[in-house]
Amino acid sequence: MVELTPRARDALLTSQTAARRFDPDAHVRLTRDGDAIRAVLASQPEPDDVIVEVGALRVFVAAGITGTVDASEHNELTAG
């Protein structure tokens, strides 16, 4: 189970909205990069992804990412 804090949700929605100006099928996909969580753009989820929807935001979350995803002051994502 993955939850997004309001700060993470706002950061991801801003990224998704900007990406969709160029690609209407763009979504944010969260992947793990060591201890950090990385947000990348994808048009489709990977087979093992979990899809998290909050309002207008639809995020693909890679398998193995659990807990609450938060964004720091500089929008660095963490999960815990």
Image (tube, helix red, strand yellow):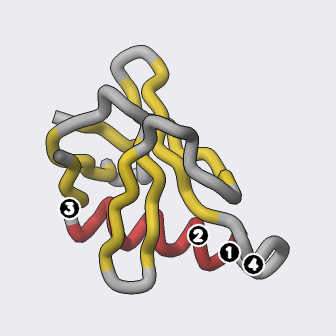
- N-terminal of the two: label 1 or label 3? 3
Tell me the distance, in whole angstroms, between the alpha carbons under discs 1 and 3.
Answer: 20 Å
Between disc 1 and disc 4, the foreground one is 4
CB-based contact (under 8 Å), mark 1 and mark 3: no
Q: Counting residues from the N terminus, which is met first, the one under dot 3 or under dot 4?
A: 3
Q: Earlier in the sequence, mark 1 or mark 4?
A: 1
Residue ID for mark 1: 18
At 61% from the left edge and 78% from the top edge, which residue is drawn?
A: 17
- The residue located at (30%, 33%) in the rendering is 65
Task: Tell me the CA gap for discs 3 and 4.
Answer: 25 Å
Residue 27 sits in which quadrant?
bottom right
Q: Residues within 10 Å of mark 2 (few under 14, many from 20)?
A: many
| Image quadrant in which you'd find residue 59 | bottom left
User: Which residue type does callout 3 highlight?
Assistant: Thr
Looking at the picture, tell me which residue is in the foreground, 24 or 17.
24
Q: Amino acid at mark 1?
A: Ala
| C-alpha distance separating marks 2 and 3 | 16 Å
**Mark 2 and mark 4: span between their CA atoms?**
9 Å
Is the residue 38 above or below the residue 73 in the image? above
Residue 16 is labelled as 2
Packing grade of label 3 (10 A; few <14, some 14-19, many >=20) is few
Q: Is residue 32 left or right of residue 3?
A: right
Which residue position holds label 3? 5
Type of amino acid under label 4: Pro
- Residue 13, placed above or below residue 3: below
